[in-house]
Image: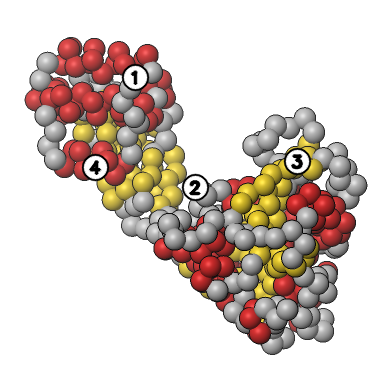
Amino acid sequence: MLRTLSFCLSLAIVVGLPELHAQKANGPAKKGGSAPAITPGILREALAAKPGEAEIAQLHDRVLRAFGQKNLMQGRAGARVDGTTVMWAIIAAHPAKVVNADGTLIGDMVPLSADGLQVLVLDQPNFSEIIYRIEVQGNVRAAGTVRIEHAELGPDSQPKADVAKGELKTFVWDKSTVFPGTVRTVTVYLPAGFQPGKPQCLMVWQDGSRHVDPNGQMRAGVVFDNLIQAGDMPSTVGVFIDPGRNAEQKEGDKAANRGFEYDSLGDAYVRFLLTEILPEVQSRYQVTFKEDPRAWGIAGGSSGGICSFTAAWERPDKFHKVLSWVGSFVDLKGGHIYPCLIRKTERKPIRVYLLDGENDLDNKFGNWPLANKQMEAALRYMNYDYRMDWTKCFHGSKGMAPMLPEALRWLWRDWKDTVGKE
């Protein structure tokens, strides 16, 4: 009872005229409002500045826009993360708190208005996972898991005013005979100064669209621009291929054929590249690829990582360079046998870059860090040209993104002495 009374008094102190401000805050949010949704970092700074009455009303509106009023009232508003700052919010008539799965307190929520909107903004350790619940009077009102994984992108992942920009072209491929009935988007990066007919190096990327997005995590095209101009890699055409979706699926839907295409062993996917996608790129954009396999690279993460390795393993006469992060060398479709195959097969002329994280997946299909350690050990045993980088990343591309410039430098480190010779 005393805590509830204190909570109500806090509302009055923070907001001043509660009914008026509830009206101001709720009205615009229901109509769409003009205030932008707020991020955890901005809210943290705003609360630390001890906002006045007018600022509190604006913060209220922006929090509603960030989470959605209905979600807040029904306990369906998941935590938001900005860097290592986490923001929780809820609408409740009584004081709320955020607790860990074991019941230990993460923090008491702070009232933001008389309508019961409460927030909690805290910095949390990087590379940590929090299983939380929001409790009100001992009852669970919301629950979820939040993952903190933050890595700053370096200068080579940022556009530079004095660096010439490559060009992105896009087409849809729906004529596959290797994977019949599938549709996919293909984005082609043509480097600055590209001349039709002049032999180019090649790098193929799985899950391509998101990796070449200049505002995405990986920003591969931006990195290509910077490294090519710096002379750290050769003039390279990037072919960014999305996995196949069924004809009835819309662009952006989770591709139904991804697992079959990427996780399967054998030469189907590399045949698809060599007989369908790459000839189409050559025809559409008058691209000529260098014939030396040392001029060809292939990249991907997770299932796209094992797919990339499989392509080079099956056709080392075509693909020399492999970039794989959080690679799924587990038993999704038999990929767990690669460490054994590597040890028992004559060394192939391929160069392999691997990256994984201590917090990667562990489930019924296998343990991703252990699988990548086994790959590392097998490559080392067979004296492959390889590099393995370990981070604290979870499963995804956040760990690879800041490492991409260095990984590409390593893969292409001797290009001037090999494919750089005309």
Q: Report the residue marked by disc 2.
A: 215
Please state the horizontal and vertical placement of residue 338, each as a whole percent of the image. Answer: 75, 71
Q: Which mark is residue 44?
A: 4
Q: CA distance from mark 4 to mark 2?
A: 25 Å
Q: Amino acid at mark 4?
A: Arg
* Crowding near the residue tagged with mark 2, few <14, some 14–19, many ≥20 C-alpha atoms within 10 Å: few
Foreground residue, 178 or 15? 178
Please state the horizontal and vertical placement of residue 28, each as a whole percent of the image. Answer: 31, 16
Q: Is residue 324 above or below residue 22?
A: below
Q: CA distance from mark 3 to mark 1?
A: 38 Å
Q: Report the residue marked by disc 3.
A: 172
Q: Amino acid at mark 1?
A: Gly
Q: Is residue 189 above or below residue 37?
A: below
Q: CA distance from mark 3 to mark 2?
A: 22 Å
Q: Is residue 205 left or right of residue 314?
A: left
* Crowding near the residue tagged with mark 4, few <14, some 14–19, many ≥20 C-alpha atoms within 10 Å: some
Q: Are marks 1 and 2 in contact (CB under 8 Å)?
A: no
The image quarter containing residue 204 is: bottom right
Q: Report the residue marked by disc 1.
A: 33
Classify the position of the N terminus by image quarter: top left
Mark sitting earlier along the chain (3/2): 3
Please state the horizontal and vertical placement of residue 238, each as a whole percent of the image. Answer: 67, 58
| Secondary structure type for disc 1 | loop
Q: Nearer the viewer, mark 1 or mark 4?
A: 1
Mark sitting earlier along the chain (3/1): 1
